[in-house]
Amino acid sequence: MRTARVRAPELRGRGWLNTGGRELHLADLRGKIVLLDFWTFCCVNCLHVLDELRPLEEEFGDVLVVIGVHSPKFEHERDPAAVAAAVERYGVAHPVLDDPELQMWQQYAAKAWPTLSVVDPEGYVVASMAGEGHADGLARLITELIAAHEAKGTLHRGEGPYVPPAGAETALRFPGKAVRLDNGGFLVTDSARHSLVELGSDGETVVRRIGSGARGRADGPPHQAGFSEPQGLCLLPRQTAEIAGYDVIVADTVNHLLRGVRLATGDVITVAGTGRQWRSTVDNHPHDAVSIDLSSPWDVAWYDDRVIVAMAGIHQLWWFDPVKRTTGVYAGTTVEALRDGPLPDVWMAQPSGLSASADGRRLWVADSETSALRFVEEGALHTAVGQGLFDFGHVDGPAAEALLQHPLGVCALPDGSVLVADTYNGAVRRFDPVTNAVSTVADGLAEPSDLVLSQEGDVLVVESAAHRLTRLAPGALSAAGATTVAGERHRTERPPTELTAGEVALQIIFTPAPGQKLDDSFGPSTRLEVSASPPELLSEGAGSTTDLVRRLVINPAVPEGVLQVVAQAATCDADIEHAACHLTRQDWGVPVRVTEAGTARLPLILRGLDT
């Protein structure tokens, strides 16, 4: 895997974060092992990698320098203030290079978020990998590089270039979601402080905190309990709460857990999840809730006589029964895209907000990566607003033409309409199912991530990047208070891959990590799924197989589109008793342009180098 000697391209971008104002160059890092993490802050898989890298940064801190290269998908992610806020929000403790024009992305041939590139102490790229789940393999690779370069005398130990930013004092820090309590107050997830905060009915007065404030996962009383970037909250029906023994469900996102909180005491218990991230196969069976792995639960809502969980990390909805203490898949196949139809065989993309209608018939869903408002009704998923993974903007009017930008929250109103926390547009939008139209209720907000109604019917917005709850002005929901915005339409513009019409060889490059081998103990070790948007782009080659090589036939009548590729490989430790197993998986959305001069080969790197 490391036979090719490819000199690492120089680091260039708009600016640096977490370096104390210093601009870094590869020459400054010579003698260190450099791990470049190409990420964007909307991407839940990128957030998973941030957490996978934390133990490596701690273990190899004197030889390893991790550099985040922020390469944006959405227009909002090009804003340098938003990038700085995300670095703080997610506790990024390494230097970050701002790459708004995707210059470094192209130089390092990245084709997916996230992508990791390893540069050795002499400045050569020695490995590249896409997706998540590479921590164990990286540890082995780093260990080999340390031994090799210590022997050559080219490894330099010592402190790295990371300079932590100054802290800030606010009552809340990047709050995520809120729920109204029976006493008229609010419970809020104080995500960046890893805790919950109870506020008074004014939405400002702090009544109490639940959680130690440090990243952790301990159960227990409020001053000892630990969370890790909690998000969604759901107040259980009173009778269900009495049987379950707790009142509130918390989506403890980065811990991959659901937690239960007893409001009378503030005590916290774990009610679902093992703390491990889900890396398995989809089934439709109920499971004992505390024995099953979850993946970044982002929101929770009571619907269909159970808790529905927005499982953002694997693009699904799950259900959880607090009485039977069981859980399972409700909707979605783990394919990241937009497809409606009967449950569960639908496609979603990082569902992040949930709200049940007042009559209980509909469950509204903020499907963030497709910039879509969707809903479940009578066993099927429908899309009200939204056009796909790469189309977004701030456009009001008829729902078929309206556009959102990475919405994270929804709030069903008593009149049947629904409010949307249109996060990256900094706006609150309203969809009216009667008129089938979208309007803007408020704008100029700092990354609104949720909405909640007070006992009096006022709307409070969780204004996450402003670190507060903001009450909308009286009359904002009236026809006179709404506005119609005809803003810009955007489409994610990554450099397209030019392919020739006709036969194209798709190859997924995968080399097991040092000390690992492909694992076929439970069936084929690899899987490849290919589809296209529009579907007519592929004349042949769509579908699922167990080979990582596929013959595609590109339709000459379709000038451009997106190839959607999902690949996974199962490995296990080689020649070790009680060997651990690993699953590496990645989704690619590859923009394609069909030209006469295009290539007939499409290599995608899951792990390894294209030599």
Image (cartoon, rainbow, N blue to C red):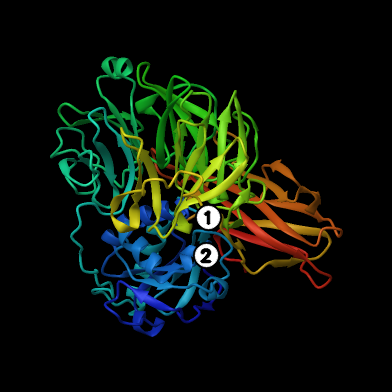
- Earlier residue among tags 2 and 1: 2
Inspect the image, locate mark 2, and give the three-letter code of the amino acid beneath it.
Answer: Glu
Q: Which mark is residue 405?
A: 1
Residue 217 horizontal side relative to residue 12, left or right? left
Visible in this render: residue 116?
no
Q: Amino acid at mark 1?
A: Gln
Q: Quadrant of residue 592?
A: bottom right
Q: Is residue 68 above or below residue 275?
A: below
Answer above or below: position of 68 versus 536: below
Residue bearing the label numbered 2: 75
Local packing at callout 2 (Cα closer than 10 Å; few below 14, some 14-19, many 20+) is some
Q: Residue at x 51, y 48 (%)?
A: 368
Q: Toward which corner of the image does residue 27 lie, by quadrant? A: bottom left
Q: Please give the name of the residue rendered at 41% of the width and 73% of the height, measured from the top-left corner.
A: 97
Q: Position of residue 527 (x, y in %)?
A: 63, 43
Element carrying mark 1 = loop
Q: Is residue 551 left or right of residue 158?
A: right
State the separation of the CA atoms marked 2 and 1: 9 Å
Name the spot of residue 215 as percent of width and height, x first: 24, 48
Residue, far bottom: 27
Q: Secondary structure at mark 2?
A: helix
Q: Residue furthest front?
A: 480
> Is 380 above or below relative to 409?
above
Residue 599 at x, y = what percent?
Answer: 76, 68
